[in-house]
Image (cartoon, rainbow, N blue to C red):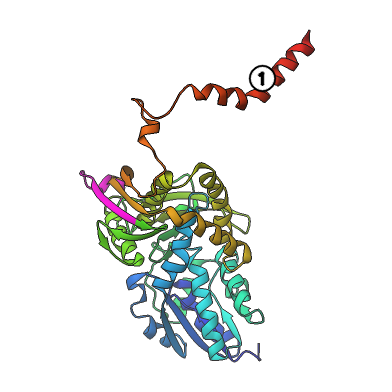
Amino acid sequence: MSDIKKIVLAYSGGLDTSVIIPWLKENYGDPEVVAVSANVGQGDELDGLEEKALKTGASKLYIEDLTDEFTDDYIVPTLKAGAKYEGYLLGTSIARPVIAKRIVEIALSEGADAIAHGCTGKGNDQVRFELTIKAFAPNMKIIAPWREWDLKSRDDEIDYAEAHDIPLKISRETNYSKDKNLWHLSHEGLDLENPELEPQYRKAGFLEMSVSPEDAPDAPTYVEIGFEQGVPVTLDGARLKTSDIIRKLNIIGGANGIGLLDLVENRLVGMKSRGVYETPGGAILYHAHDVLETVTLDKETSHLKAQLALKFAEYAYNGQWFTPAREALSAFVDKTQETVTGRVRLKLYKGNIINAGVWSDYSLYSESLASFGESDYDQREAEGFINLYGLPIKVKALLDEGRKQ
């Protein structure tokens, strides 16, 4: 520990990282602590961070705006892949590699001896942070206080904060573990640890990006999203950068109760955990993208892509973003997206996303073939197809019949 003179800390200003700065100084021989906060679209959570970081012992605070990098290099590839982990749209998972990558860059430029993070020893984030650090600074020492200190719970952390005059924005009663960024907001802890209990969606202050579907308007809202090669580029006819489309859809979707997910998921470390996710804009974009692919991808490509989407989701969830396998999957996905260009109209109503039209110059849908009216399809040709397709079944049945005689 005496060799560690400077530590770069992944700093959010939440409960965990608020107590880590004084803890590091007390337990690692009073090193210099450089705090790094990443702006990945969490909004006013960054307000007052510099004053707080310096007051609790940091020598400086970097606030890095990574929102567009997060959107373009992490959200968009995951969206194009259609990747979901057990229904979860990977909001925390894909934010960790972009944050950790920038922290490594700052740690190397600062000549730091170690990188510290506030992830618990029970969670997935410790893996995501540390695998990214290993990818870009394989010899960097990593300090994970939750795996070292004597604090056993978030209540213990609050006690520590109060004893060290560290200001907190939470109380013991509102002490959910939350993670917010442009893509989503997650909630864990307190009553959510019991899967027998219904989430208190209508409780004041619980939901932040959305309303309960019960409180959504009685009239539907229509949105139209345009894509170019799988990338969202327009909203209701206006061309916007993707991060701005997400911001606007978060507001529109949130007001209509879209994108709430109550999930008991399988963590990488082996246990099950329960969380509630708010992903209003993300849920809309995933749905629109899926609709567009139904008319622009052929069957074999679509089915193969759906199989590989699960692997993509696992790589993202498990912290394996910076790996040859994930990069190879993204190359495959990019090839599939060459024709995923067009517009999708959706109707949003009390938590539901309802299809309301799709248009694409690359559509593979032929009304003249599919129509129940007169069509270009010669139905007599189906007989030969069925005879050949069913030949193995027929042969087996005939042979089985012969063996019984």
- Residue at the location (51% across, 57% down)? 335
Residue under numbered circle 1: 394
Q: SS for tag 1?
A: helix
Give above or below for 230 relative to 222: below
Please count the marks in the image.
Answer: 1
Q: Position of residue 355 (x, y in %)?
A: 32, 42
Residue 214 located within the stretch drawn in magenta: yes
User: Which stretch is magenta?
Assistant: 212-226
- Residue at the location (42% across, 47% down)? 296
Which quadrant is the N terminus positioned in? Answer: bottom right
Q: Position of residue 26 (x, y in %)?
A: 56, 86
User: Is the residue marked by circle 1 packed among few (<14), some (14-19), or many (20+) residues within 10 Å?
Assistant: few
Q: Which residue is at the front of the view, 92 or 230?
A: 230
The amino acid type found where label 1 is placed reads Lys
Residue 399 in which image quadrant: top right
Residue 371 in which image quadrant: top left
Q: Which residue is at the front of the view, 210 or 16?
A: 210
Give above or below for 55 relative to 403: below
